[in-house]
Amino acid sequence: MAMDAGCIVISYFAAAGMRGTFFSDTNWPFILGALVPAFLLTALNNESYATANLEDPFRSVAKGLQAYMLAISTVIFIAFCLKASTTFPRLVVAIGSGFAVVLLALGRYMFVRHMKTIIGGNPFSIILLYDADQPVPDGDFSVVIASDAYFNPDVHDPVMYDRLAQSLAGADRVVVACSPERRVAWAQALKGANIQSEIFMPELNALAPLGISTHGTVPTIIVAAGPLALFDRFLKRSFDIAMAAGALLVLAPVLAVIAILVKLDSSGPVFFKQVRIGRGNQMFRMMKFRSMRTERSDGAGERSTARDDDRVTRVGKIIRSTSIDELPQLLNVLRGDMSIVGPRPHALGSRAADKLFWEVDERYWHRHAAKPGLTGLAQVRGYRGATMFEDDLRNRLQADLEYLEHWSIWRDVKIIVLTFRVLLHRNAF
């Protein structure tokens, strides 16, 4: 909170100094004096300082900027209602807001990234309670307690409940490892503990549930959530159209030159179209600049491209190593087959260690819950090129599933920016 307030104060001081009104104008300090508490109240209300939002730097940045925009909008609205437009320091507020957005974003990102170093350890206290007959699960726990020495959930004793409360005082979470027969008893005991309480259920690994719902009065486990919410789909699709249309407009001369070079280099069509697996496991025809000789192209994708592959043309080597061959997929984005960011689409015959992708890991089909992308989290982490080993696929799959679970428009922007760092990659051939 102190860092956030400091970022805002420094930004407005800098803006007033740039305008030369640091001492001559007395209006901007009043705006700043109203803005800082308004921001802190808004940040508290939108949970900018909640544990979950301080464990992910990008989520922390998004929450902080959201709080600032709401706070400055409130201050401007109040100034309008009080008819203070003649004395309102417009340029100082505009410049100060620009600085504040940048400083808040940088400050929050760096603070969360290095929070353990700044604070001197994990700031979040997690207690593990485990029954004597249960193994101690792996994890970064602050305190590990054998529950039998402190508490028996089957015995309702005020003294025992008090002992449990004292053991959990000051913790952020408590996790219980117990046998299936004792889970209900533990759940009942912890519901009044005034702390986030969780119970290990390792058998759910196979189901990978997303949450809990009900059918009538019977609880159910959510194993798939389907598409993004309506507004999120609208936001992502609008972003895709704007990015794809803008890129095609800017890159049109480059695309025309590449098309001519591909045509002159070898006989055959300019574009290579291949059936790939898209959203909802539906197939579509993905477009690329042709980089291989027509008579030796692999329509099913059964053979991964190797370094110094004799099927690749001279122009093909260049456009493959720079990922330029992927640019026609901007047309797939406009058609709605693909997105700018998402799991990369695979050919039907793609293999890892002589196994079809879905034979390597049964979670493979889960990655198709969203539209495939021009780039993705797996690509910016360097997982691209031939899949010679099963782990080559598993690494990509894990990144794809992580992207789907934690999607946000901010993350899409981050992945696009990071993509430029891996356009020239040792595995691009």
Image: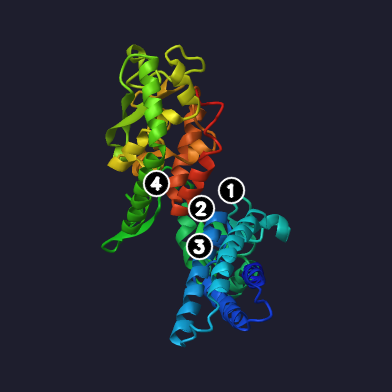
Given the image, on which type of amino acid does mark 2 rest? Phe
- Please tell me how crowded label 3 is: few (under 14), some (14-19), or many (20+) other residues with Cα within 10 Å: many
Q: Position of residue 13 (x, y in %)?
A: 66, 72
Please indicate, yes or no, whether residue 147 appears anywhere in the rendered image: no
Which picture quadrant has residue 257? top left
Residue 200, which numbered label?
Answer: 2
Q: Which numbered disc, 2 or 3, marks the residue that appears first in the sequence?
A: 3
Give the CA distance from mark 4 to mark 3. 51 Å
Q: Nearer the viewer, mark 4 or mark 3?
A: 4
- Please tell me how crowded label 1 is: few (under 14), some (14-19), or many (20+) other residues with Cα within 10 Å: some
Given the image, on which type of amino acid does mark 3 rest? Trp
Kindly check if marks 2 and 1 are in contact, taking CB atoms under 8 A apart as contact.
Answer: yes
Q: Nearer the viewer, residue 356 or 191?
A: 356
Kindly check if marks 2 and 3 are in contact, taking CB atoms under 8 A apart as contact.
Answer: no
46 relative to 237, above or below? below
- The residue located at (67%, 57%) in the rendering is 115
SS state under label 4: helix
Q: How is the image coloured?
A: rainbow
Give the CA distance from mark 4 to mark 2. 43 Å
Q: Position of residue 144 (x, y in %)?
A: 65, 56
In the current view of this chain or complex, which residue is farthest to the bottom? 82
Q: Which residue is mark 1?
A: 137
Which picture quadrant has residue 19? bottom right
Q: Tell me the quadrant of the picture where the N terminus can be found.
A: bottom right
Residue 243, which numbered label?
Answer: 4
Given the image, on which type of amino acid does mark 1 rest? Pro
Q: Which numbered disc, 3 or 1, marks the residue that appears first in the sequence?
A: 1
Q: Which residue is mark 3?
A: 186
Kindly check if marks 3 and 1 are in contact, taking CB atoms under 8 A apart as contact.
Answer: no
Give the CA distance from mark 2 to mark 3. 11 Å
368 relative to 238, above or below? above
Q: Which numbered disc, 1 or 4, marks the residue that appears first in the sequence?
A: 1
